[in-house]
Image (spheres, rainbow, N blue to C red):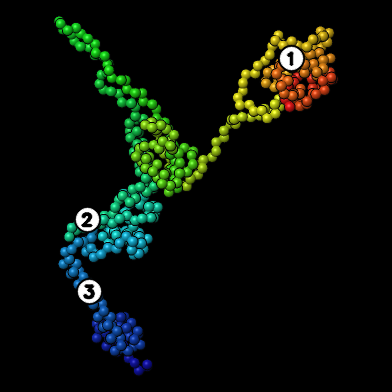
Amino acid sequence: MDERNDEELIQQFRDLTSITRVEAIQYLTASQWDLSGAVTEYFTIQEEAGEGDVEGNKKVQETKLYTGPRTLDGRPAPESISTIGSSSRVSATKDRKSGIATLGSISQSQPSRDNFDDSDDEDLNHGKEPRDLFAGGEKSGLAVQDPAEHQNHPKKVVRDILKMAKANAARLGGEGGEPSAATPSFFRGNGQTLGGDDTPSRIIPNTDQPPPEVKAARARTLHLWEDGFSIEDGPLRRFDDPQNAADLQMIRQGRAPVHLMGVRENEHIDVQLINHDENYKAPPKVYKPFSGTANRLGSPIPGSTVKAQTPISVATETSISNPKLDSSQPVIKIRIQLADGTRLPAQFNPTHTIGDIYEFIERASPTSNSRPWVLATTFPTKNHTEKSIKLEETPELKRGGTAVQKTI
């Protein structure tokens, strides 16, 4: 190793290859300073590089002589294009590519969106891919994808509806508000002919019917969600339901589904669109006051219901005779409410008994005996069945008050 003259080997290698000193040292170091091995390695690499250049030039010449169909960027079109169901196409559609598209790349790339607004929306890439159609002659050709494949996709329909809404809003804004009914530019009314010496003038009545009155359009709110749509505060209607897809098609065509909007045939409707960038969320429940039947507290008839408040009849004192009163004693005023809702004002002396009130009710309402009943007070609630007790001995009635006829 010590006897080796490195500089001499480097100079000999450079004389044979005409390369720089640094490159010569690299080749000699890689071959363990074997001059013949380094020279052989150098020329082998040069031959491989030369073959690559020859092949490249050959391809360029073939391209210049090519007279067949070419791609959009000028390169020769591929001889065969993979079918829709091929595995290579499925794998190719997973990657997005940019740049100029060729016939081969079009057949293997992501389906076009037919001028969709949101090119990055992945929802339209699922399912069946669009058909590939081809047009052109011997020396020219184009790959065309069927645009009808995604026309009825719910996302495409929703975007069309939003476009229509924006266009209508811009049109109405430019016109200064809602369009009013068009006023006829021609005369309507009776006419009169001009008479002469032998022909008198005559009036020609108007036979045209007056134009129908234009009713105001009914307003409805259409909520568009990521997973469906809803009308007003109604439930979610999913995009994957065929019936809902048909309803969306009607809305895109400017027609309102009668069963969803709650309108009549040929009735004008003003649909307000609200686009939500989220999945459906049920609206909060609105508090509504109680409505319906109810049980009245302290009802004379247990379990009876009151559907609507009816006028309460009040019997006059002249129609029903009060019990015989002693003017020398105090007077107790008791308001009696019968089971049918009738109110009876009555006057008693403290010496009158509970039985006198029973007799007064039986005279005032003979039909009361059709069902058993008792006399009761409401505050506090108590049934008075002992008829011999005087009113002055009854804490609930000795100063007057209210008594009810309670059926049992």
Q: Residue at horizontal 21%, vertical 70%?
A: 59
Residue furthest out toward the front: 370
**Res. 276 in view:** no
- Residue type, mark 2 in image: Ala
Q: Residue 382's spot in the image, x, y percent?
A: 78, 26
Q: For the residue carrying disc 3, how many other residues have a C-alpha within 10 Å: few (<14), some (14-19), or many (20+)?
A: few
Spatial separation of the CA atoms under disc 3 and disc 1: 128 Å
Q: Which residue, given by chain and number where applicable, does mark 3 sit on? A: 55
Q: Residue 15's spot in the image, x, y percent?
A: 24, 86
Tell me if 312 is positioned left or right of 281 in this view: right
Residue furthest out toward the bottom: 3
Q: Secondary structure at mark 1?
A: helix
Which mark is in front, 3 or 2? 2
Residue 135 — which label? 2
- Residue type, mark 1 in image: Arg
- Residue type, mark 3 in image: Glu
Instruction: Tell me which label, 3 or 1, sits earlier in the chain.
Output: 3
